[in-house]
Image (spheres, grey):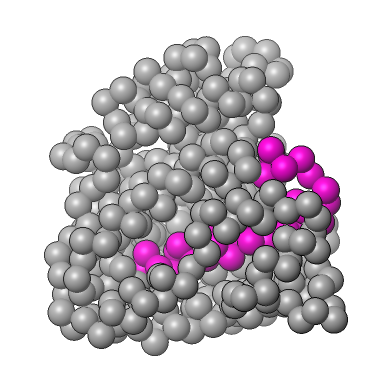
Amino acid sequence: MNTQTEQPTEIAEQSILNFHTYPFVGADDWRYAFQTAQVRVLETRMLSRAALSDMANAESYEAAVALLSATEYAIPHAGRNFAELENILRLRRTELRELFAELILDEPILELFAARNDFANLRLALRRTLTEKPLGTDYSDDGNVPADLFQKTLEEENYDALPDYMQHAIDEAVLAYYQDKNIRRIDYAIDRVQAEFNLQKAHQLKNVFLIALFRIQIDLTNIRTMLRLKFTESEQGPGLAAAERNVFLKGGYITPEQLQKAPDLGYESHGQLFFHLPYQRLVETAAGYLASDKSFLKAEQQCDQFLTGFLNSTIQITAGPQPIIAYLLNKENEIRTVRLVLTAKKSSLDTKLVLDRIS
């Protein structure tokens, strides 16, 4: 079976930061002048933070849905059930990805972002196959590989029809899972292969924005993992196994060695590990909330906020693929947030918890 090629040497090098808050987003590309202008108009139609907060503060699910009546997420008055909402959100996501495919002129960038769906489909198919549990079949049709091919190839154990990066991910995930049949190891393995794949492609494209984006995403994934490991240790007692501490992804601005120190420290000391990095406030806020509320809500909110801040820094680009990529990711996050808020309202969750997650 084919395996992934070695990482570029740039990925393995020790992190060197030459920025204060967000890395450089690259230069203008005037081939994208019209596409960038189109995206700038679409950005003005996105839901504001105030609008999302109003939904969270609404007195009921029906009242929250009513606040969407003048937006693209409006549900017909006669049928405001949750299934109808899900259909509308899926339709908006499909339309968004179709628009992205129209606006991006560089086919390798389009294929790179479509690969996200391949990895998501593979994750679901592996979980279903290895655990022999019905975990759902919500496969995406927006990837480079037909969605129905994943389950078929895994059941037949013939992976030749899949791209090399998918075959490599299967190898890594299967080997990791059968160490102790821990389903979380499937996620760790796929995250690692996907991170390597993203960075390799970004370096091949010599795209500084994509390199920065993927390195930040690696860091945010590692910060979530760091906090989860710390919480596990604080609840179950000290002494995480070395294998557990060896799950951090490589290639980010934070070195794995820095992250491995965190479980041995108190929550109040986590921020100090990152005093020289732009993540200090993020980690302090998330760790403090985890210690006081035993919840990862603030960790998710702070990671989303940091990534959004980086994406919004592409406002300095007059023409280029950067604003289009930023719009795709920001709009996908908006769709997820609408679903999150309305799910919470439908389930009558505490409004404070919803606000903690989104603002």
Work out whether residue 194 or residue 69 is closer to the camera in this orientation and state it: 69
Q: Residue at x 73, y 53 (%)?
A: 58
Q: Residue at the spot x=76%, y=81% of the render?
A: 76
Q: Choose between 209 and 11: the one closer to the eye.
A: 209
Q: What residue is rendered at 15% in x and 70% in y?
A: 28
Boundaries of the magenta span: 325-354
Q: Is residue 59 above or below residue 151?
A: above
Lateral position of residue 123 relative to residue 32, left or right: right
Instruction: Name the spot of residue 85 as percent of width and height, x first.
Output: 74, 72
**Going by the image, does 197 lie left or right of 183?**
left
For residue 333: magenta?
Answer: yes
Q: Position of residue 326 (x, y in %)?
A: 37, 64
What x and y, as percent, mark residue 101?
A: 41, 83
Verify whether residue 275 appears in magenta. Answer: no
Q: Is residue 296 visible?
A: yes
Residue in the foreground of this view, choosing between 143 and 173: 143
User: Does residue 301 appear left or right of residue 183 in this picture?
Assistant: left
* Vertical relation: 272 (above or below) 114: above
| Residue at 19% in and 71% down | 318
Q: Whole-percent x and y of residue 33?
A: 21, 81
Q: Is any atom of residue 107 visible in this view? A: no
Task: Give the overall secondary structure of the magenta segment.
Answer: helix
Tell me the quarter of the picture where residue 89 sits: bottom right
- Position of 318 with respect to 116 (left or right) is left
Residue in the foreground of this view, choosing between 108 and 152? 108
* Vertical order, 173 against 271 (above or below): below
Locate residue 73: give its quadrant: bottom right
Q: How many labels, in total?
A: 0
Looking at the rendered image, the quarter that the C terminus falls into is top right
Where 309 sits versus 101, above or below? above
